[in-house]
Image: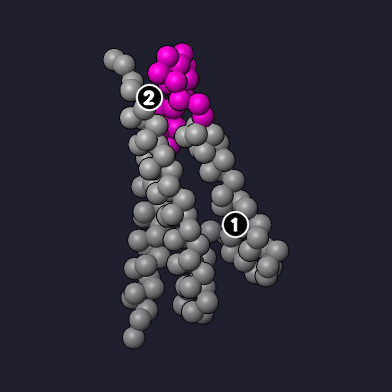
Amino acid sequence: MAIDTKKLGSMMTAMFGMLVALGLADIATTGVALYEGPPFVELNPLASMLFQQQAVGVAAALFLKFIPFVPLAYGVFAKREASAPVHARAFKFGVLIALCAADILYVGIVASNLHLLFAALP
C-alpha cells in the first residue's frame, strides 16, 4: 500500500493549523474562566500552580503548553519527497496519528471550557 505524501502533507498541515487554533482557543477560554473568578479553577495542578505566579508563571505555562507542538511541526513541515524512504513515510504517518489524537483531545478541552463558561452565564 503506497502512501501519497502530497495528500498526507496537506492533511497534516490542516490538522496542525487546527491544533494551534484549538490550543489558542483553550488559552482564551481558560483565561476568561479564570478571570470570572471563584467558581472556575484550573484542573491541571501544574498549570494552576504556574497561573498563581503572575506573569512569569503564565509565560512558563504557555511555553510548556506549546513546546510539544515543536516535534509535531517538524513532522508536518519536514521535506516532502514522493520517493522518501519507508521510515520517513512511516514517521509522517505516525505524526498524522498524533495530530488526530491531539486534535480530538483539544476539541474536548475547548468544548468543556465553553460548556462551563456558558453554564455560568446569567
Viewer-closest of 35 and 87: 87
Measure the alpha-carbon separation of dots 2 and 1. 32 Å
| Residue matched to label 1 | 62
Asked if residue 46 can be seen in this view, the reply is: no
Residue at left 38%, top 43%? 14
Three-letter code for the amino acid on which mark 1 is drawn: Leu
Question: Which quadrant holds residue 119?
Answer: bottom left
Residue 62: horizontal and vertical position, in percent? 60, 57
Residue range corresponding to the magenta coloring: 78-99
Label total for image: 2
Three-letter code for the amino acid on which mark 2 is drawn: Thr
Q: Residues within 10 Å of mark 2 (few under 14, many from 20)?
A: some
Residue farthest to the bottom, as pictured:
122
Residue 111 magenta-drawn? no
Residue 113: horizontal and vertical position, in percent? 40, 65
Residue 15: horizontal and vertical position, in percent? 38, 43
| Residue matched to label 2 | 5
